[in-house]
Structures are given as C-alpha cells and as structure tokens.
Image: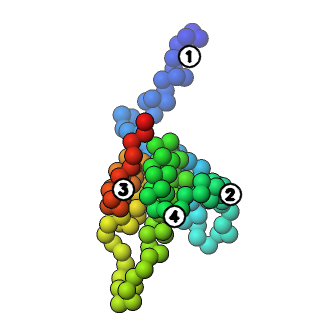
C-alpha cells in the first residue's frame, strides 16, 4: 500500500502537463528576472527591486569595462541560468556600444544592425526565458564585434 501511494505521489506531477512540454514563464526564471517582469506588469507601483540591486552590485564588482568582456560575462551567466545577471551584462554591453562617437547628422538614427541589434535580441530572449536563443545572439554579437568568444579550456 505504501509503495503504491509513493508511486502515485511521484508520478502524478508528470501527468499534470498532459503530454505538453514543460511550461515556460515565471516559474523557470531566476528571482531577478521574475522581479523585472513584475515591475513591467505594474509600472505605477513604487519599485522594490532588491534582486536587481544585488545583480547590479555583482556586475559592478566584476569590474568589466569593455563590450566584449561584458558579452562574455553575459554568456557565462546564461550558461549557468542566471538570466537576471546576464540581462545586466547585456544592458551594459549595449550601453557601452551606444555611447560612441557619432556624426551629428546621424545622431537621431537608431542603431538597428550589428552587435547592438544582436544584444537587444539576446536581452529580449533572456527576459522571455529563452536561454538558447540568448546564447546564440550573444555569440553573434561577439562575432559582429569581431571578437568571438574563447572556448573554455
């Protein structure tokens, strides 16, 4: 009897999805990413974002200053399923690339190509919990910078 009960307790969650893939969404995201999504859903609320503050402090402590280094750090965070940290590094890499010298007649033209576009795609994918797409876009951004990610040894 106990064995049958234990079997039911262990197998019932497997049947809960009715043959569908595991649900995506907030349950699979790290606390910082869930916090970002909650803030977006209720923009009028006073922001309380302790996870994002910790993530930003961790990124500051990393001391990475160039876009390629930030992208490599984002890639490492994505591999470890730390999407909030990856988003922080991606935002910093994007900002680093956007704060460049631009002729005055092109200052109002948005950057929609090259590494900046790839970083934006990686950021969106990370926010949605699509880690594989975010990894591919991060690699593509590094290639667009002509600085492919070094393979770990």
Reading the image, the residue beneath label 1 is 5
Quarter of the rendering occupied by the C terminus: top left
Q: In the displayed structure, would residue 102 be above or below residue 20?
A: below
> Closer to us: mark 4 or mark 2?
4
Q: Quadrant of residue 105?
A: bottom left
Mark 1 or mark 2, earlier in chain: 1
Q: CA distance from mark 2 to mark 3?
A: 34 Å
Residue 146 at x, y percent in the picture = 33, 59
Q: Which mark is residue 50?
A: 2
Mark 4 or mark 2, earlier in chain: 2
Reading the image, the residue beneath label 3 is 147
Mark 4 or mark 1, earlier in chain: 1
Mark 3 or mark 1, earlier in chain: 1
What's the residue at 39%, 42% (across, down)?
151
Evaluate whether residue 5 shows in this view. yes
What's the residue at 33%, 72% (across, down)?
112
- Whether residue 125 sits left or right of residue 81 in the image: it is left
Residue 140 at x, y percent in the picture = 33, 56
Reading the image, the residue beneath label 4 is 92
Evaluate whether residue 108 shows in this view. no
């Amino acid at each position: 009897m106990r064995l049958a009960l234990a079997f039911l307790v262990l197998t019932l969650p497997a049947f809960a999805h009715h043959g569908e893939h595991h649900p995506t969404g907030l349950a699979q995201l790290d606390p910082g990413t869930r916090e970002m999504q909650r803030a977006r859903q209720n923009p009028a609320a006073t922001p309380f974002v302790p996870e994002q503050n910790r993530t930003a402090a961790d990124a500051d402590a990393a001391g990475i200053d160039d876009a390629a280094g930030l992208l490599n750090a984002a890639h490492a965070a994505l591999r470890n399923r730390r999407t909030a940290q990856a988003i922080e590094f991606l935002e910093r890499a994007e900002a680093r690339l956007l704060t460049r010298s631009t002729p005055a007649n092109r200052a109002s033209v948005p950057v929609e190509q090259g590494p900046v576009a790839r970083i934006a795609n990686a950021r969106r994918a990370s926010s949605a919990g699509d880690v594989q797409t975010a990894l591919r876009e991060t690699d593509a951004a590094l290639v667009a910078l002509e600085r492919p990610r070094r393979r770990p040894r």
